[in-house]
Amino acid sequence: MTTSITVLGSTGVIGTLTLEVLEGLSEQFHVFALTAGQNMELLAKQIIATRPEYVSVADEAARQRLLTLLPPRTPSVEIGIGTPGLVAAADLPADIVVSAVVGAVGLLPTWAAINRGATIALANKETLVAGGDLIMPEAAKRGAKIVPVDSEHSAIFQCLEARGTGENAVSRLLVTASGGPFRTWHAEELEKVTVADALRHPTWSMGRKITIDSATLMNKGLEVIEAHHLFDAPYDSIEVVVHPQSMIHSMVEFVDGSIVAQLGLPDMRLPIQYALTYPMRHPRNGKRLNFAELSTLTFEAPDFERFPALRLAYAAGRAGGYAPCVLNAANEVAVHAFLAGELPYRAIPKVVEETLQRHAIGHPQSMDDLVEMDVASRLMAQAILQEGRWRDWGSYP
Ligand SMILES: NC(=O)C1=CN([C@@H]2O[C@H](COP(=O)(O)OP(=O)(O)OC[C@H]3O[C@@H](n4cnc5c(N)ncnc54)[C@H](OP(=O)(O)O)[C@@H]3O)[C@@H](O)[C@H]2O)C=CC1
Ligand SMILES: CC(=O)[C@@H](O)[C@H](O)COP(=O)(O)O
Ligand SMILES: [Mn+2]
């Protein structure tokens, strides 16, 4: 019997790589359901190649486009739309749900998959950032295993296997960061960043939103909160280490001072495959890290002044309650505006900070509370954008 897989966000960078990994493991896995947003050309090809029972797309217009792209003899596939379609895909009885949509749109489908006790291969960090306090206890209650796909968390997950049997063996999680494209830029140069500059990531090829998050270091902030939830680690024990070569994907320090690191070429196929085959390791072909070719590995501390998003994320994580949900929603709005050419790079963390100051009080009691706050925070961030006060903010911080 083969393991069934649903891929939420199959047309994205992680989704596409997941299907590539599955192709290499086709004797062990089959695709159950796929979801996409607007890229119907790619989804149509994926449907023809993998024959899912169900797919979901962003809206009715996308569904109509998809129907025109499917050849007449394609075996019938049910097509859902919007958030209900995403939730329906996650609800179907696949063994593993790969959560690879971008943003808090992943909250409800990931919640649905957890509620039925599925294994989640989690790439969609925004969901855990916004809802970790509800999601982790629910996963434990339902017996739903969450296996990280994010490279740093996959690394920590792998390093933790060296923990042995001792309790409280871990002293620090060392989350590595490339530092992004502006690691060496001066504060004045950061005033003139273009969208093209910010999309030029030094080591990884990723979707647009996460690439901008890497450029502000918000990605690392989101990852600190993600690590807090995944590994039940206090914020004081999670440290960010800038490592521009992206060969060490993260490290764990144990109480005896021993540090275990996970290394590999920057290629997401490895953490994706490990999440799918865990606890087994399956052979992979392809280029390997060659230490003789690798002349230097360097490390530095993050600069919280030039990259205030990292400071904001630590603060929101420590504050807890609604704060991480607000941080994430405001960041999504600000990044979207930056990519549309409507907001300068340097104003992204300012919009997030202003939204947090106006909005982040209390604790969610339910997923409905959280979704309500996510929507309200987006409206607040949009209002802050429309006020246009960021034009007067000048340099930030
Ligand atoms: N890329 C990477 O290397 C890594 C990514 N991650 C995380 O994985 C997630 C995905 O990242 P990545 O693959 O780079 O992102 P992409 O932008 O490449 O892909 C996003 C996917 O989500 C779909 N999507 C977007 N909006 C909606 C919506 N409203 N409704 C339904 N589907 C939607 C897109 O559909 P369509 O394109 O059809 O519109 C696409 O399939 C993010 O949370 C990111 O932080 C984590 C670690 C590494
Ligand atoms: C591949 C991956 O996991 C990304 O999250 C990556 O780590 C981004 O690079 P930064 O370290 O620049 O944020
Ligand atoms: Mn990462």
Image (cartoon, rainbow, N blue to C red):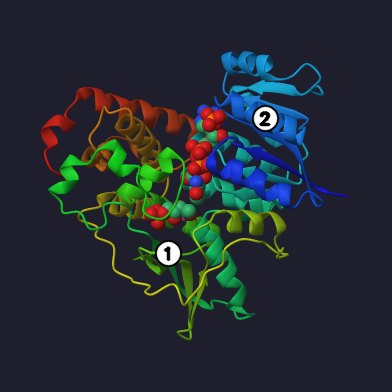
Q: Residue at x 56, y 27 (%)?
A: 37
| Above or below: residue 120 compared with residue 289 | above
- From the viewer's side, name the closer residue of 302 and 93: 302
For this orientation, the residue located farthest to the bottom is 256
Disc 1 residue type? Answer: Val
Q: Residue 51 appears at what percent x and percent y?
A: 77, 32
Q: Residue at x 18, y 32 (%)?
A: 390
Q: Secondary structure at mark 1?
A: strand
- From the viewer's side, name the closer residue of 394 and 190: 190
- From the viewer's side, name the closer residue of 294 and 62: 294
Which image quadrant for residue 382?
top left
Q: Residue 13 appears at what percent x and percent y?
A: 53, 42
| Above or below: residue 15 compared with residue 245 | above
| Above or below: residue 69 compared with residue 149 | above
Q: Give residue 45's mark.
A: 2
Q: Residue at x 32, y 58 (%)?
A: 179
| Above or below: residue 296 compared with residue 14 | below
Disc 2 residue type? Answer: Lys
Left or right: residue 104 compared with residue 165: left
- From the viewer's side, name the closer residue of 338 and 122: 338
Q: Secondary structure at mark 2?
A: helix
Q: Give residue 175's mark.
A: 1
Q: Residues within 10 Å of mark 1 (few under 14, many from 20)?
A: many
Q: Residue at x 72, y 52 (%)?
A: 24
Which image quadrant for residue 42?
top right
